[in-house]
């Protein structure tokens, strides 16, 4: 057990034979970091998972079998359709889904779906389906996979309006995953400017910004988020709301970033090698971009990576409370909001699938951040 | 020490003033106000409107005055114990929120208590059993616990409770006590329900503290004085409790100043998920319906609670760690 | 007059007081008198050793001379081509063109090399940023410097992590030499190294001094290292110089009780007669709040009443031997 966890979670930093060679001696910082990162296997796996998720989010319309807002009124609350390889009396390389039928259970009086193995629809790659516009560039009806018209493929079931959960989760991925990035980019810019001013100029600017940071930290974040989001006019377009929410998230997010930047900046400024450059006659600008920024970036990337999941969580929470994004925007938080009722969830557990994805992404970001943190200073012994 | 406390309290004042301004601005941000919305609603339903009453209210709260006048009135009234009027509940704000604030404080403080109660021994165990199966398990669970947001945990717990045992884990009271006046039986009922929210609210921070405790203690155990004491044949438990654990605890105590505010703020969403009769759901409702004085009072009180708990933990730290100078 | 021309560096009444700031408004509550009224001269081509316990202000003096810090008061004069440059009042621009004349060797060979730059970039940086008159062949010059300090010039493209502590310190020396400086301030250049490596670096410093006619301010808390390399030695205690004399005078005929105490702590391999072992008691005084009279009196075993009340000043008690002690003429102290 402990060995397994050891292998997965934090591989021992054994010295590899590599360290002996010239290859190691002339390795750039980036190479060293990558080598070190690679040893954190869970982080590497997480990186691949995140890459996969973002890829899906980018090609959302193509990957999802249906239009996420399309209502299949004959398939309300349909459970997940299973993928079968054995059908039509034999094994097939090409898997299929069975048609779902609906009946009312005579005892509980609840709706019940059952599969009809005699009616198998093989799953086709590059199938034709709902029309959509890809990235606003061109229109097509090509989907990564699907079934012949007549059959249905609800791999993750449908919601109370008969919308395909898989397609909705994929559409939500685009919003939820991007909001983390956009929010963190804004936080970073704000934090960099304010933290940089604070750290570099010091004096009155530093004192004022430090005070501001202190006040912001004393402020309970979530009530403030709620208050600001509640203030967004209902009449705003979905896109406007999306950007407003990212701005609200980064309004508080910058505080942590600015603190990290300022602290790191102050520490680095005092480093011997920066002093050496100064004594050699290097200009301020050269010291900043040649000596401070490179050491600094790897640490800041760690801070940012670990901040992204917080942004995603915050968006999810706000949308779940009905204060964040609103339909027709589909985010994972919006999907959760649609199932606020616990009974609803208990009877249709597939509605909880977005939670699984949120957790997966959050954990993956944390593992990647953990791995980056180890790798950020490849020279530490 | 007394000087230090007084000065710290003095420093709190500008922070509180800024916080009150931000709070007020935030709640005033939405266009229109409650009365206008309400009048429109009533008119749409062809209901009779008591124009005089509305005008009187408008007058009293200066709704037609510029925002800084409204702010001034608001602060002035609060300083006299009047938090304004809740349009939604049709009662003075302070009557509506008292119990909710109390319950929020109870949950936050219990959660803080639980965090330390769990994190310290588990952290000690983990550090003293470094690289054992138990340690790896603790480390892993702590990592996951730290990453998971509390409200999702609440959601999952509710779901599991309902799906597996068909019980509802939400709420703080059984149905028969929900609206009953306070009594010994009600307190008992509260204690029976308290553990779910406390666990949910405390998980993330417990995980964090376990990691901190483990790391600190490991650092401490590597120091020469521990080796020396061990060489002298001091019993392992005595040795541990004498200095290393105490020193390792200091960062945890200083972490309290971040922790309490987190508890209070973090409990907001969790409370909505769990349907607790605390500040969270009511704040949400007030924000939605633009019940400004109610929302404002909540934001202000939560912030004040945050600032005060920061102060308390700083004082605690100054008292526990003589290295910190008050000067 | 002639003697004056021979002085590369003249420091007079140099002071550096760090304000102690506290609280929200950064009120100044007092000053750390890190360097307090220090005067000395260094002749061209000689090595002045600067010794004293940790925190007494040695590094601060070094940083002041290089203007990594701005003096609170006092003058620092540096002779460049028969002209005195007043270092203490150089503007930022003048300072950058002055940098080529004085360079620093750091104590920590790990912290002082940017891990993200190759050896070529590190040693070449001073040349690169000062390249104003004619373009030099950077690679060629860096290789020369590497040869000079005993590094294989094939390692040009390696990063610092490829080198051992001693080799890293050689890189640091090469960087300091890159601009052909006159003065090198070496701030504890060997104290972070293994004892076996220390001698190598000291020999290197000695050799290049001969070859390049360098002048050293050699800072150390280790008297045996200082004895090895210095022509003259200055002993420092809590921001002030307490004794300044030729190497031999300091080590054989110390005149200050503090010097004697420091010498007593030096381990001797070949001890003819058993020395009276005597260790320095007490702690170094707080430079923010020094004792009255002679700062050393609380720890001095010869202290008399006068030492507690009367401040001391440096006086020449014998030719080229300055001491700051009320009892300097009465005491006969033991050297090595
Ligand atoms: N930037 C600064 N701000 C405030 N005080 C400082 C600063 N730099 C040095 N000091 C103080 O000045 C005094 C002298 O420091 P300095 O570094 O010169 O000592 P040192 O003799 O080089 O000691 P060491 O042997 O430890 O290197 C110390 O008390 C130190 O705390
Ligand atoms: Mg020093």
Image (tube, rainbow, N blue to C red):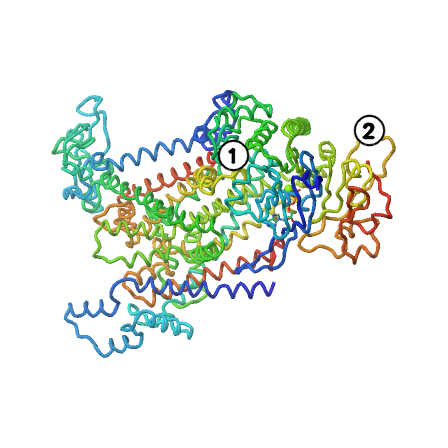
Where ligand 2 lies, by image quadrant?
Answer: top right
Using the image as rendered, state which of residue A309 and residue A197 is in the foreground: A197
Residue wearing tag 1: C126
Q: Position of residue C124 (x, y in %)?
A: 50, 30
Say which chain tag 1 marks.
C
Q: CA distance from mark 2 to mark 1?
A: 44 Å
**For this view, does B155 lie left or right of residue B3?**
left
Mark carried by residue C270: 2
Say which chain tag 2 marks.
C
**For this view, does C312 lie left or right of residue B193?**
right
Q: Nearer the viewer, mark 2 or mark 1?
A: 1
**What is the number of callouts on the image?**
2
Using the image as rendered, state which of residue B195 and residue B219 is in the foreground: B219
Q: Position of residue C329 (x, y in %)?
A: 85, 48
Q: Earlier in the sequence, mark 2 or mark 1?
A: 1
Using the image as rendered, state which of residue C118 and residue B29 is in the foreground: C118
* Discs 2, 1: same chain: yes
| Residue at the extreme left of the image, as rendered | A150
**For this view, does B279 lie left or right of residue C10?**
left
| The C terminus of chain C sits in image quarter | top right
Q: Position of residue B57 (x, y in %)?
A: 28, 76
């Amino acid at each position: 057990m402990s060995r397994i966890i050891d292998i997965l979670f934090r591989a021992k930093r054994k010295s590899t034979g590599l360290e002996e060679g010239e290859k190691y001696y002339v390795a750039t910082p980036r190479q060293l970091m990558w080598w070190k990162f690679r040893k954190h296997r869970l982080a590497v796996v997480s990186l691949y998972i995140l890459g996969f998720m973002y890829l899906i989010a980018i090609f959302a319309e193509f990957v999802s079998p249906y239009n996420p807002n399309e209502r299949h009124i004959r398939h309300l609350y349909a459970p997940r359709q299973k993928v079968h390889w054995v059908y039509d009396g034999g094994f097939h390389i090409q898997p299929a889904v069975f048609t779902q039928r609906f009946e009312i259970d005579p005892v509980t009086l609840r709706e019940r779906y059952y599969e009809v193995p005699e009616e198998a629809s093989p799953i086709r790659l590059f199938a034709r389906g709902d029309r959509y516009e890809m990235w606003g560039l061109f229109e097509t009806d090509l989907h990564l996979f699907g079934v012949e018209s007549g059959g249905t493929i609800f791999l993750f079931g449908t919601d109370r309006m008969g919308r395909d959960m898989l397609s909705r989760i994929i559409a939500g991925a685009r919003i939820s995953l991007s909001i983390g990035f956009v929010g963190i980019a804004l936080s970073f810019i704000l934090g960099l400017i304010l933290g940089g001013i604070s750290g570099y100029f010091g004096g009155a600017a530093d004192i004022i910004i430090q005070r501001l940071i202190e006040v912001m930290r004393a402020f309970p974040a979530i009530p403030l988020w709620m208050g600001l989001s509640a203030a967004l006019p209902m009449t705003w377009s979905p896109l406007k709301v999306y950007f407003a929410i990212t701005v609200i998230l980064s309004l508080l997010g910058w505080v942590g970033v600015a603190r990290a930047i300022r602290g790191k900046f102050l520490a680095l400024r005092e480093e011997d090698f920066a002093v050496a450059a100064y004594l050699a006659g290097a200009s301020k600008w050269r010291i900043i971009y040649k000596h401070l920024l490179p050491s600094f970036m790897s640490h800041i990337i760690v801070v940012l990576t670990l901040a992204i999941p917080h942004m995603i969580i915050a968006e999810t929470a706000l949308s779940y409370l009905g204060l964040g994004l609103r339909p027709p925007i589909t985010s994972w938080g919006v999907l959760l909001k649609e199932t606020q009722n616990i009974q609803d969830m208990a009877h249709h557990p597939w509605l909880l699938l977005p939670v699984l994805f949120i957790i997966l992404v959050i954990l993956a970001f944390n593992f990647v951040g953990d791995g980056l943190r180890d790798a950020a200073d490849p020279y530490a012994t | 020490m007394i000087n230090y406390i007084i000065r710290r309290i003095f420093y709190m004042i500008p922070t509180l003033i800024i916080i009150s301004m931000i709070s007020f601005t935030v709640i005033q941000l939405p266009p229109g106000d409650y009365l206008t919305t309400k009048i429109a609603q009533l008119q749409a339903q062809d209901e009779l409107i008591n124009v005089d009453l509305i005008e009187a209210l408008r007058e009293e709260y200066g709704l037609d005055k510029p925002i800084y006048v409204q702010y001034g009135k608001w602060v002035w009234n609060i300083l006299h114990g009047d938090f304004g009027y809740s349009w939604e509940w049709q009662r003075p704000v302070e009557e509506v929120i008292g119990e909710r604030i109390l319950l929020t404080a109870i949950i936050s403080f219990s959660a803080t208590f639980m965090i330390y109660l769990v994190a310290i021994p588990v952290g000690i165990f983990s550090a003293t059993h470094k690289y054992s199966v138990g340690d790896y398990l603790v480390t892993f669970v702590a990592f996951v616990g730290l990453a998971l947001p509390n409200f999702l945990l609440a959601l999952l717990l509710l779901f599991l409770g309902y799906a597996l045992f068909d019980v509802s884990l939400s709420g703080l009271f059984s149905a028969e006590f929900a609206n009953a006046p306070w009594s010994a039986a009600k307190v008992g009922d509260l204690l029976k329900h308290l553990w779910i929210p406390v666990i949910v609210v405390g998980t993330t921070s417990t995980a964090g503290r376990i990691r901190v405790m483990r790391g600190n203690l490991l650092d401490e155990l590597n120091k020469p004085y521990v080796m020396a004491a061990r060489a002298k044949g001091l019993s392992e438990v005595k040795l541990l409790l004498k200095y290393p654990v105490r020193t390792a605890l200091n960062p945890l105590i200083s972490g309290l100043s971040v922790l309490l505010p987190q508890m209070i703020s973090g409990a907001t969403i969790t409370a909505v998920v769990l349907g607790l009769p605390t500040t969270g759901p009511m704040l949400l409702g007030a924000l939605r319906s633009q019940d400004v004085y109610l929302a404002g009072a909540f934001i202000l009180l939560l912030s004040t609670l945050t600032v005060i708990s920061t102060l308390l933990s700083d004082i605690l730290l100054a008292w526990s760690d003589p290295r910190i100078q008050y000067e | 007059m002639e003697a004056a021309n021979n002085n590369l560096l003249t420091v007079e009444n140099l002071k550096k007081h760090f304000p102690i700031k506290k609280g929200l408004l950064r009120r100044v509550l007092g000053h750390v008198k890190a360097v307090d009224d220090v005067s000395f001269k260094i002749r061209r081509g000689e090595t002045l050793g600067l010794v004293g316990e940790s925190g007494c202000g040695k590094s601060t003096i070094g940083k002041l001379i290089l203007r990594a810090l701005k003096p609170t008061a006092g003058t620092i004069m540096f002779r460049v081509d028969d002209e005195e440059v007043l270092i203490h009042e150089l503007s930022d621009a003048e300072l950058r063109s002055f940098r080529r004349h004085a360079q620093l060797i750091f104590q920590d060979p790990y912290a002082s090399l940017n891990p993200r730059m190759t050896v070529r970039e590190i040693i070449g940086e001073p040349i690169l940023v000062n390249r104003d008159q004619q373009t030099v062949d950077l690679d060629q010059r860096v290789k020369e410097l590497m040869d000079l300090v005993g590094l294989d010039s094939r390692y040009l493209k390696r990063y610092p992590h490829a080198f051992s502590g001693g080799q890293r310190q050689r890189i640091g020396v090469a960087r300091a030499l890159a601009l052909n400086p006159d003065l090198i301030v070496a701030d504890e250049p060997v104290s972070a190294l293994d004892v076996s490596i220390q001698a190598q670096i000291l020999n290197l410093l000695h050799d290049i001094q001969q070859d390049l006619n360098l002048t050293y301010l050699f800072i150390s808390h280790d008297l045996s290292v200082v004895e090895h390399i210095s022509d003259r030695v200055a002993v420092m205690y809590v921001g002030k110089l307490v004794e300044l004399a030729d190497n031999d005078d300091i080590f054989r005929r110390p005149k200050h009780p503090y010097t004697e105490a420091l010498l007593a702590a030096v381990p001797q391999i070949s001890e003819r007669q058993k020395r009276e072992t005597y260790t320095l008691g007490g702690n170094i005084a707080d430079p923010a709040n020094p004792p009255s009279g002679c700062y050393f009196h609380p720890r001095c075993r010869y202290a008399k009443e006068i030492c507690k009340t009367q401040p001391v000043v440096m006086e020449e008690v014998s030719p080229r031997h300055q001491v700051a002690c009320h009892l300097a003429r009465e005491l006969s102290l033991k050297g090595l």
